[in-house]
């Protein structure tokens, strides 16, 4: 399921959606200076990540969806394991979870967004290496 060639591989490993080899981000999603900063091109297959101006604005909708999914997950977990906790504690725990996971939600949203538009091409690196010879 998470093998190379699947969209989940590219999304979860934050790799190039076309070759699944090159890194998508300039650094770690948890490092504040590089948080959410996408590289210009893939270093392996030379795919331009910013397909058009403001391309990644659409990923904000994905971030919203991931945030709602996290909200529901925390809520359900709290209902299962701590059913007697009041709404104030629930609200604080949801806010803490959103704060802690927001860098990874932000990073995942951009890789999910570009994976909607770019397909995996297994032969792209073979073409590149054969052109270099
Ligand atoms: Zn690539």
Image: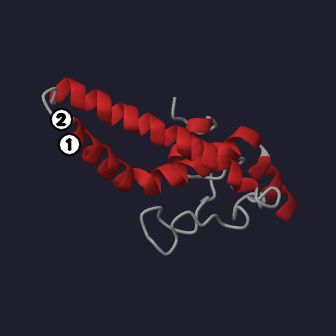
Q: Quadrant of the rendered structure where residue 81 is?
A: top left
Residue placed furthest toward the bottom: 33
Color encoding of the figure: secondary structure
Which corner quadrant holds the C terminus? bottom right
Q: Is residue 7 above or below residue 13?
A: above
Give the side of residue 103 with respect to residue 122, left or right: left
Instruction: Tell me whether circle 1 and circle 2 mark residues in contact (CB < 8 Å).
Output: yes
Name the residue at 38% across, 49% down: 98
Measure the C-alpha gap from mark 1 to mark 2.
6 Å
Name the residue at 62% across, 53% down: 21
Residue 60 shows up from this direction: yes
Give the side of residue 70 with respect to residue 94, left or right: right
Front position in the image: 33 or 60: 60
Front position in the image: 100 or 127: 100
Residue 86 — which label? 2
Front position in the image: 130 or 93: 93
Q: Residues within 10 Å of mark 2 (few under 14, many from 20)?
A: few
Q: Quadrant of the rendered structure where residue 88 is?
A: top left
Residue placed furthest toward the left: 84
Residue 126 — which label? none
Q: Is residue 109 above or below residue 34?
A: above
Q: Residues within 10 Å of mark 1 (few under 14, many from 20)?
A: few
Task: Where is residue 12? Give x, y as percent.
Answer: 51, 44
Give the side of residue 11 with respect to residue 17, left or right: left
Q: Is residue 75 above or below residue 27?
A: above
Instruction: Identify the residue position indicated by label 1 in the image.
Output: 89
Name the residue at 20% across, 42% down: 89
Residue 119 shows up from this direction: no
Residue placed furthest toward the right: 131
Task: Where is residue 63? Give x, y as percent.
Answer: 55, 46
């Amino acid at each position: 399921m998470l093998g190379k060639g699947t969209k989940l591989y590219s999304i979860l490993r934050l790799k190039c959606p076309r070759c699944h080899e090159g890194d998508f981000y300039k650094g770690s999603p948890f490092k504040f200076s590089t948080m959410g900063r996408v590289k210009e091109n893939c270093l392996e297959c030379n795919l331009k990540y910013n397909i058009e101006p403001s391309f990644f604005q659409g990923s904000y909708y994905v971030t919203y969806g991931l945030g709602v999914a996290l909200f529901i997950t925390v809520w359900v977990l709290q209902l299962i394991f701590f059913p007697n906790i009041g709404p104030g504690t629930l609200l604080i725990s949801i806010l803490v979870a959103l704060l802690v996971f927001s860098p990874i939600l932000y990073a995942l949203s951009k890789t999910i967004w570009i994976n909607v538009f770019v397909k995996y091409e297994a032969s792209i690196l073979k073409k590149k290496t054969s052109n270099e010879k």
